[in-house]
Structure formats: structure tokens, C-alpha cells
Amino acid sequence: MRSSIAARTGAVVTATALALTLGVGSASAADPKSTAAKAAPTQKHVSKFHLKSGVITQHTRSGVYGDVLLKGPGKVKSIKTEVRINGVRKGTVKLYTGSYKKSRSGKIKGGGVDLPRRWGAGAVVLGPTTFTYSNGATTVDQKKSNRFYIRRDVKTLKSNNTALVIKRTNKKVTFKVQRVSIVKPSSGKYVSAGSVKLQYKSSTGKWKTKKTIKLNSKGNGTYKRTTSAKQRYRIHVSKTDTRVQFRTRPSGRI
């Protein structure tokens, strides 16, 4: 993500009023209500700091986008912000400015950060933020971002992208889960997701869990049942603070 840093200049406007005092004594030139009460900010600061959640994949860094807008005078050379994940300080990263935009094609633009994969998943808060100016001076804005999440990706590694295969022979139905995996932040490799939920669509239209299928080290698992009822099925992995939601398309009535 890339976005130019727009520097805004502010002018300090002050006003003085001369108040004359009648009677004995000299004139006074002090009106406290009119002295620099509306002075412009003296340094750069983040006026809007709201990010969407991001996803950890095999890449070394994960782009997280949102609205990062600045106000205040000064030409900024670089911006770095502190990162905390699950309340633990991880380090600092470059902060990009811009307004969040998502096109119809799915392309995303905006401000935000690139988080190192090895820092792991969970709840993220950014800030304080350090501004370095063109003259070498620095200032710090203590403002914190909203709480957002960086979650581990879940997907099937099957070459045909088919995570669930269902076969029926008379009343015997076999469900095969194929290579459902979750990314490991430390290495970027995908490992077994551990388990998935086999769900069926009830007569009320709601999805209900029939069985939690345990997966082996390769992300494979099998479940068999005997039934004459024909239903629509899917497998589902629920979203948490540290992983994304994963589910297959509903099957036909099998």
C-alpha cells in the first residue's frame, strides 16, 4: 500500500483589544478572551485512525487497510506507529495515510500498515505514532487506533479446491474432508486445521452441526453415516479472534 503524505499548514491568529478604564489610573490592554484562543495545532497528529481487520497468509507481511488521516502543520518525511497484539508490544511499522476504498473488482486502497507474519494473530491496536519531519525533528502523537484483528487464513490445499466430497451408496453416506489447513505464522506453512464441523441444512433453513470431524496431520478426515434422508451439507470452521471463517458451498440434496 502506498499513499502520499499531505502536509497542511496552519496559521496562528491572535487578537488583542485595547480596553480603556475610566476614572483614576492608566489604560489596560489585556482582554484574556481574545488572546490566541483559536490557535492552530503546533504539530502533526492523526485525526482519523480506523482500520479493517486483516488476514495472515504465507507472505512475510500482511497488509491491513483503513482510514488514516492527518492534520496539523509541517512537512513529514516518515511516520511510524507502535503495534500491540493481544496487549503485547511487538514493535513499530511504517504507517501509510489515505482513505479506505474498495472497488467493484475487489481492489483495496487506503491507509494502514503491513504487519510481519511472525508477530502472530489476535487483537491489534496501533499507536502512539512518531512523525519525523524534513528538518529531522520528531513529534509523538499518543492517539490509539480502533481495535481490529489479524487472523490466520484457513483453506483447502487440494489442487481442485474441493474441501468436501460426499458419496452415497443406498443408505450409506461417506463424507471425506480434504486437506483443510490453517497457516502457521512462524513459518508461513499451512498445517492441519485440526477439525471441522459437518453441517446440514434443516427444514427451517438453518445450518445445524451433525458431526465434528477430526483431521489428521494432512488436514484429511472421514465420517460415515446411515440415513435415507436426503439433505444439503457443508463443512464449516468458525471465525475467532485468531482465525478466519471457512466454509464450503452447500451441496445438492444427497
Image (cartoon, grey):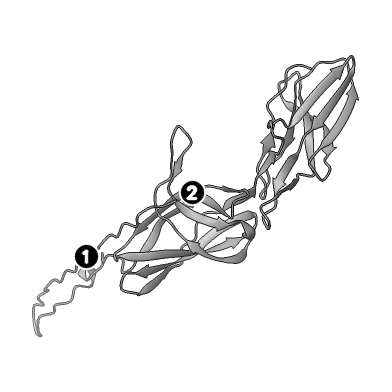
**Residue type beneath disc 1:** Ala
Q: Is residue 174 left or right of residue 143?
A: right
Q: Is residue 103 above or below residue 31?
A: above
Q: Residue 11 has which mark? A: 1
Residue placed under numbered mark 2 in the picture: 65
Is there CB contact under 8 Å for labels 1 and 2? no
**Earlier residue among tags 1 and 2:** 1
Tell me what residue is drawn at x 33 percent, y 68 percent. Answer: 43
Tell me what residue is drawn at x 58 percent, y 62 percent. Answer: 84
Pinpoint residue 47: horizontal percent, then vertical percent: 39, 57
Closer to the camera in the image, 13 or 137: 137
Q: Is residue 61 left or right of residue 26?
A: right
- Count of marks, rendered view: 2
Packing grade of label 1 (10 A; few <14, some 14-19, many >=20) is few
Quadrant in the picture for the C terminus: top right
Pinpoint residue 235: horizontal percent, then vertical percent: 75, 32
Element under disc 2 = strand
Distance from disc 1 to disc 2, alpha carbons, whole Å, reads: 32 Å
Front disc: 1 or 2: 2
Closer to the camera in the image, 159 or 249: 159
**Residue type beneath disc 2:** Tyr
Element under disc 1 = loop
Q: Residue 40 has which mark? A: none
Tell me what residue is drawn at x 40 percent, y 47 percent. Answer: 99
